[in-house]
Amino acid sequence: MTADHRLLTEKVALITGASSGIGAAAARVFAREGARVVLTARREDKLKALVADLREQGLEAEYVVADMTRRADTAAAVAHAVESYGRLDLAFNNAGWGTGREPLHEMDDELYDRIMDVNVRGVWNCLRDEIAAMLPTGGGAIVNTSSVGGLIATPVAAPYVAAKHAVIGLTRAAAAEYAARGIRVNAVAPGTTRTEVVTEWFAAVPGMEEALHAATPQPRTAEPEEIAEAAAWLCSDRASFVTGAIMPVDGGFTMV
Ligand SMILES: NC(=O)c1ccc[n+]([C@@H]2O[C@H](COP(=O)([O-])OP(=O)(O)OC[C@H]3O[C@@H](n4cnc5c(N)ncnc54)[C@H](OP(=O)(O)O)[C@@H]3O)[C@@H](O)[C@H]2O)c1
C-alpha cells in the first residue's frame, strides 16, 4: 500500500463562492488533495456541473445553493456538510464581490451596503456557523478571502477596501478567540487574479492590465489555482502552528 501524501485527506471542507473563479479552483484543488468538499454559491447550474465533474474523477463532492448574506443560508450550508459527511473540518470563506470605478464621494449607499453585505456579513455569518460546528469535534481550520485591498488602499474602491480590511479584523479576532480550542483562522490576500470579472475589467479599461503588471514584482496576473493552493495549505495540518496570519498571494504587489 502506498502512503497518502495529499494535503487534506478525508477532511470535510466547505467552500463558499465555489461557482466560479478562485472558489471553483479551490474546489478542484481541495478535492484533488483528498478533501470531501461541500460547495456553495447562488448559481446552481455552475455548482451542479462542477460537482458532476469532480464525481466523474472519483472525488467526493456535494453542493448547496446559498446566499452568504443570509444567516439561514450559511447555517443550511454548514448543516449540509455535517449531514453529508458527519463533521466539518475546514472552511474556505471565499464568496465576495466588489467594484471600484467611481470616486468615493460619488458612490451611493446601495453600493456600500451590497459590498459590505457579501464581504463582511457573509464572512461573519459563516464564521459563527462553522465555529459552532467545529467545536464539538475538537476544532478545525478556516481561511477567509481578503485581498491586497485589505492590506493597502487603492483609489476608487473605498467600500471594497474597507470590507476587505474588516475581513482581516474578523480573521484575527476569531483566531485569537479560538486558538486554544483547536480552531485556526487565517486569510489569503490575493492580488489581481484572472477570473471572469477581472478579464472583463481589463477589457473595459485599456492599459489597466499593463499598469498592474508594471506595479507587481512578479509582473503578471495570478491564476485562480495559485490562490487556491495557498488556501489549501493554510487549511492543512502542515500549517498546524499558523493562525491569525494574513498571507498575501500577490507576486510581491504589497511588498514594494
Ligand atoms: N479576482 C481578483 O483579482 C481578486 C483579488 C482579490 C480578492 N478577490 C476575492 O476573491 C474572492 C473570489 O472572487 P473571484 O475573483 O473568484 O470572483 P468570482 O469568480 O466572481 O467569484 C465570486 C464568487 O462569490 C460568489 N458570491 C458572490 N456573492 C455571493 C452571495 N451573496 N452569496 C453566495 N455567494 C456569492 C459567486 O457565486 P454566485 O454568483 O453563484 O453566488 C462566486 O462563486 C472574492 O472574495 C473576491 O473579493 C479577488
Image (tube, rainbow, N blue to C red):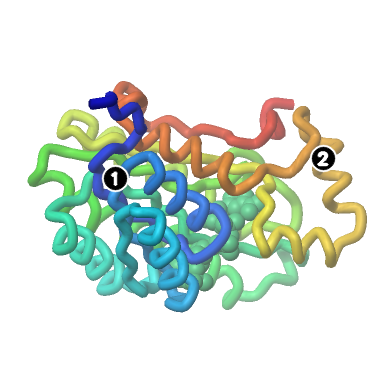
Q: Position of residue 14 (x, y in %)?
A: 32, 55
Disc 1/disc 2 C-alpha distance (Å): 33 Å
Q: Give me the disc on residue 114.
A: none
- Judge from the rendering whether residue 41 lies leftward or rightward of residue 209; answer left or right: left
At label 1, counting other C-alpha atoms closer than 10 Å, the crowd grade (few under 14, some 14-19, many 20 or more) is: many
Q: Residue at x 23, y 31 (%)?
A: 179
Q: Please name the amino acid that badge 1 sits on.
A: Leu
Indicate the secondary structure of the residue bearing disc 2. Answer: helix
Q: Residue at the spot x=29%, y=39% of the render?
A: 141
The circle on residue 90 is 1
Assess disc 2: are there few (<14), some (14-19) or many (≥20) residues with their C-alpha within 10 Å of its C-alpha: some
Residue at the image point whose x is 84% and y is 67% from the top: 204
Which of the two residues, 227 or 132, is positioned nearer the viewer here?
227
Q: Which residue is mark 2?
A: 213
* Residue 9 against residue 64 in the figure, above or below: above
Question: Residue 29's x, y, as percent?
Answer: 45, 45
Element on which disc 1 rests: strand
Q: Residue at x 40, y 54 (%)?
A: 57
